[in-house]
Image (cartoon, rainbow, N blue to C red):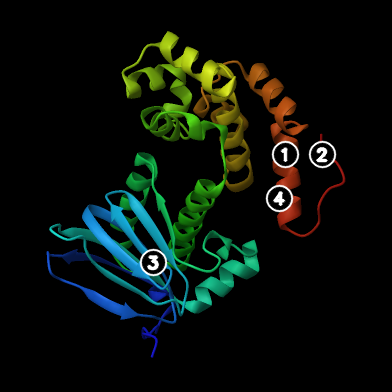
Amino acid sequence: MPLRLPWTHPTEAIVWSRIFYRPGDAYPFHSHEFAEFFWIEDGTLRHRCDHGEHRMDQGMIALIHPDRRHALEPWPGHHCVLVNVTIAPEVLERLHQRYGPWWHLAPDRPWHHRLSAADLQALQAWIEILGSGAPSILTVDAFLCDLLRRLERQTESSPLDVLPEWLRDALEACREPPQLSQGLAALVHLTGRSREYIARLLRQQCNTSPTELLNGMRMRYAAERLRLGDETVTDLAADCGYTNLTHFYRLFKAAYGCTPKGYRLQARQAASGNPLPNSR
């Protein structure tokens, strides 16, 4: 029989726990009617399922379908500390209705991936928020949307995959302020490498420059905040590291074909079900 949880209140639609496994501990094969995420805080885990087994160490995350069988135990000779998040079926349905299908992240088997340092830090911060008291439905949805956004982004192939891990992690940290506004200076600080070395590596491996790469990251961040936030365009430009507002407008229009204000209007009209034909 699949495991069930007694979901009794909307704010209990997700349940999280921190689980400690000592050498020799084991959770045998089981299934459950809820979805489950877990990531490794410390140590090494053996995660077994009908398709085989996976070694998971610190920073790795797994996503489990409802009704899928799996088993957990520390890797031989190791301990393991993991954070487990279970999600009620009705919450999945709500997400599906609002945002469309996202379960392609793990279509027919447990999905495993290594989190970046920035993603792991962000999820740990969410756990502190969720553990500080009964979370509101808004908080629950905000956490799940952020989690799924990070996982979906991990599934997208990227030319940056060829870069060494130390540079990929630094770029991940620069996706949001304050590092985003600091640009190349933040990359130099985070990696301990020189500007010239980073620029040469990006040109050799990705045929791009730090300026081109960082401008693209800044435009994507600006577009996301224009859709979801209420910052003024001036404040948003500053968050992205631009003191020249005209330059910010020019870059944004080149990327998205409209001004930041027009983009925000289009996004909000589309969300209301009444898209504008044009808002340039």
- x and y percent of residue 124 in the render? 31, 51
Marks 4 and 3, Cα distance to the nearest angstrom? 45 Å
Kind of residue indicated by mark 4: Arg
Tell me, for residue 268, which label it has, or none: 4
- Disc 2 + disc 1, Cβ < 8 Å: yes
Task: Tell which of 34 and 13 is nearer to you.
Answer: 34
Question: Who's the residue at 53% across and 49% down the image?
Answer: 155
Near mark 4 (Cα within 10 A), the count class, few <14, some 14-19 or many ≥20, is: some
Please give left or right for residue 219 compared with residue 77 in the image. Answer: right
What SS does tag 4 mark?
A: helix
Depicted 168 relative to depicted 56: above or below: above
Residue 210 visible in this rendered orientation of the protein: no
Task: Identify residue for label 2.
Answer: 279
Marks 2 and 4, Cα distance to the nearest angstrom? 11 Å
Q: Which of marks 2 and 4 is nearer the N terminus?
A: 4
Question: Who's the residue at 57% across and 67% down the image?
Answer: 95
Task: Identify residue for label 3.
Answer: 52
Q: Which of marks 2 and 1 is nearer the N terminus?
A: 1
Near mark 1 (Cα within 10 A), the count class, few <14, some 14-19 or many ≥20, is: many
- x and y percent of residue 137 in the render? 46, 68
Marks 3 and 2, Cα distance to the nearest angstrom? 52 Å
Please state which of the two labelled residues, at mark 4 or mark 3, is closer to the viewer.
3
Kind of residue indicated by mark 2: Ser
Depicted 75 relative to depicted 50: above or below: above
Please give left or right for residue 57 compared with residue 198 in the image. Answer: left
